[in-house]
Amino acid sequence: METKTTDKTHKTNKPALTGNWEPQNKLRLERLIAEKAFADNYAVFDWDYTCIFYDIQDSLFLYQLEHLCFNLTPEQFAVTIRHEIPQDIPLVGCFNSEGRQLTAADLSADLDDRYRFLYHAYQHLNGTLPLGEVVQTEEYLDFKTKILTLMRYAVTVCDTDISQSVCTGLTLPELNRLVEKTIAEALTAEIKQYTLVSPVRQAGRAGVVTATYRKGIRIQPEIRELFRRFEEHGITPYICSASQEDGVRVFACNPAYGYCLRPEQVFGRRRLRNADGVFTDERDYSIPQTWREGKAEAIRTLIAPRHGGKAPILVAGDSDGDFCMMDAFKNEALLLILYRNQKPHEQLYPLIQQGIAERNAPDASIIVQHRDEATGLFISGVSDCAGGSVNVL
């Protein structure tokens, strides 16, 4: 991607923002755009829970589970769910109904058996039964509950994301179609949390476990408009996401969803494909892994060189996964934090408190934006509670 040249003769129009930004955030962003326009500047955004409400990677994973969209034999599946995940280290916080702490090996052994059953039962894998019948079986409930459990807790012992691993066996066009179907379903789904308990009769090696998951994605019109205002004023928005790059690109770059970014503006985790264009178990380590410290490294090595080595003028995120890129550029960038009732032990908490304390300062270095958790949409005019924190859950 070529670096845009600065047009010093271009007159900057007032970058008015609409929508439900909190008033002080709207003014601060408008000031930022006016001050940084047409000088080859850029801004960096996390994607999940920042540019959208909820998580495209988790939603895609759930869609694959609920529709059994896998291109893996039982033997391949067994390899995929173990790849780069230590099998015998206790998973932090992961216990069965009897209080026994589980390992990945416990869950993987049961998943082997359940996937083999599903593979030979479902008509679009290697069986004859329609999806509606398969998902009513106890084997399916055990499979769904335990793979969600493995996804949630494997990251406590490694940085492998099971929700991305199961794209193994798909081609890029197949993955893109699944992402589009995921988005279509998630945009209309009720925003809700669900709880599953695995069947006692399918206890297996791991025993009975409980898993929770969420449904419902919402587009953030205010972020879409902010992207447009940035582009209109010569400021390039980028995405730096821990989700799979190809999946985020479907959402961020398809004009149907309104974000209208170009593929080269989206960075995320990548997986290698074989000579036939099929995703493998192997991650692409030729670029930084865009998770925690890797996000800051990705900005320095992949984005900043496109802009003369400059730091971003804004960094936006919502979780401790974004803390490192915020901390790395806090002296140069305005920090935009999407509020999620972060707790005192979280790394973002002090930054949120600082943002609330300076919320009315015209030159605030941190701004905090709230949403209605029931609708996924921005809300304005939130007053802070005792101690400076705000709870809108």
Image (tube, rainbow, N blue to C red):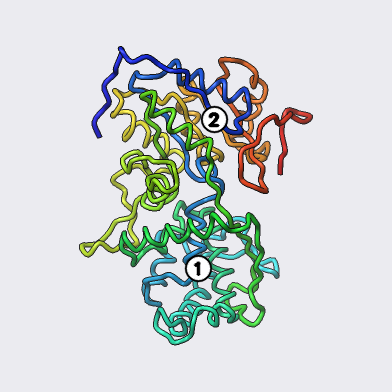
Outermost right residue: 386
Picture quadrant of residue 352: top right
* Camera-side residue of 376 and 305: 376
Label 2: state its secondary structure. strand
Residue extending furthest toward the left: 275
Q: Residue at point 47% right, 37% down?
A: 224
Q: Look at mark 1 in the image and give the residue it sits on.
A: 65
**Label 1 element class:** helix
Number of the label disc, if any, that sits on residue 229? none
| Label 1 Cα crowd, 10 Å radius (few <14 / some 14-19 / many 20+) | some
Residue drawn 42% across the image and 34% down it? 296
Q: Is residue 282 left or right of residue 129?
A: left
- Residue 113, position as x, y percentages in the image: 49, 79
Q: Position of residue 311 (x, y in %)?
A: 39, 24
Q: Is residue 208 above or below residue 266?
A: below
The quarter of the displayed image where residue 36 is located: top left
